Image (tube, rainbow, N blue to C red):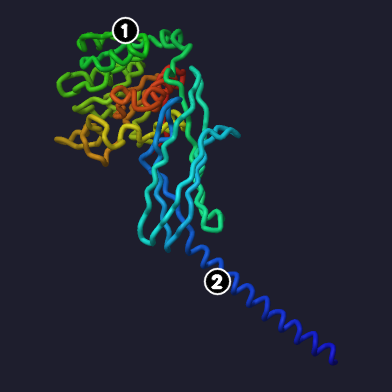
Amino acid sequence: MAAETFTKRFLSGLSAILCAVVMATSAWAAEKDEGVVTIYPDSEQGAAFFGNQHGTLSYQFESTKRFEGKLLWQYAAGARTIERGEEDLLLMPGRKGLYELPIAMPPVREGVSFETRLVVTVIDGDNQEVASHVQPIWLFSEDPFVDRREWLAGLDLHLYDPEDATVARFDEAKIPYTRINNSNVLPDFEGGILIVGSGTSLRKNRGLTDNLMKLAQRGVRVLCIAPVDGEFPWPTRDEFPELAGVQFTSKQVIYDLDKRLFPGFDALPGLPGKRNTVTLESRRGQLRVNLSETPDGWPWWQVRFDNGGTCILCCFDVIQHWTTGPTPRYSLARLLEELSSETGFSPTEQ
């Protein structure tokens, strides 16, 4: 009986001790969680660069209470560390601390792309990790068409470019094409892929959009790059019985082309020129696809036909921003691949 009483008292006491330990541990964990630092990578920065390029990646740090520690960063390719560094980190509650990390990208051989990574770590005064962020960074060679000139020639590219900007860029990049100087000959066009150059005014070139739609209806693949103004007619099945689909697409289309690229490449602060988007408007009972500077529009509009023809209105100016990074030229290269395939290109439905 005495042994039974002792056992009950012992178990009761042990339970109380365990309960106290659990409560203390929970309180300690809550206190630790309260001081955890949050890392916010800059949403406007890209993660695609040329080899041998110098870039700056920005991060914001936030803590719910005063925090003193260190910011450690390591830039690596595979198991090889390219650069590393550390800075003192002081955060006050309610204030985000901004830190910019300059990175020197390693060189990249022609025709090669590979992934690197930047690891950002925050440690406290006891050298304990409290936060970490890993950012993949893709590096590209400057020419996406290395050893592909024969393939490019086989695409039979035709270029209508009244502003000459795309002509100059294609010549510099050694992209072969046949130039069309007069839009009046477009109704009789028979070729591979038709490109309307960057900066073209659809308003001044009357009848151009109607001709582009009719060419797509006949099976031609049409790419209209960043026009400055104007509108397209809304296609109907009455007018185009071969109509297969119409899509408005967000910047997600860049990811659809190549997930290594940066969809916001043409919206970075300080870039020249304006950025148009596509909106759907009703005028006198008719729907029109209109270009405007509204930020709420779509950067991509595409019409597809049963025979493989397509007409793409691309508001991403891959020509004007060609030199800002890999995304413009590599997205164009991927788009040409898709347009030349048997199935054509259809981005994610939205």
Q: Secondary structure at mark 1?
A: strand
Q: Position of residue 269 (x, y in %)?
A: 28, 37
- Which mark identifies residue 120? none
Mark 1 crowdedness (10 Å alpha carbons): few <14, some 14-19, many ≥20: few
Q: Secondary structure at mark 2?
A: helix
Q: Residue at x 26, y 21 (%)?
A: 198
Quick one: 94 or 328, which is closer to the camera? 94
- In this image, 120 relative to 195: left or right? right
Quick one: 183 or 138, which is closer to the camera? 138
Q: Is residue 194 visible?
A: yes
Q: Residue at x 47, y 49 (%)?
A: 71
- For disc 2, the marked residue is 27
Q: Is residue 313 visible?
A: no
Q: Position of residue 233 (x, y in %)?
A: 23, 27
Q: Residue at x 46, y 31 (%)?
A: 260
- In this image, 96 relative to 342: left or right? left
Q: Tell me how far mark 1 sits from mark 2, CA to CA.
A: 73 Å
Q: Residue at x 29, y 13 (%)?
A: 159
- For disc 1, the marked residue is 178
Q: Position of residue 341 (x, y in %)?
A: 46, 18
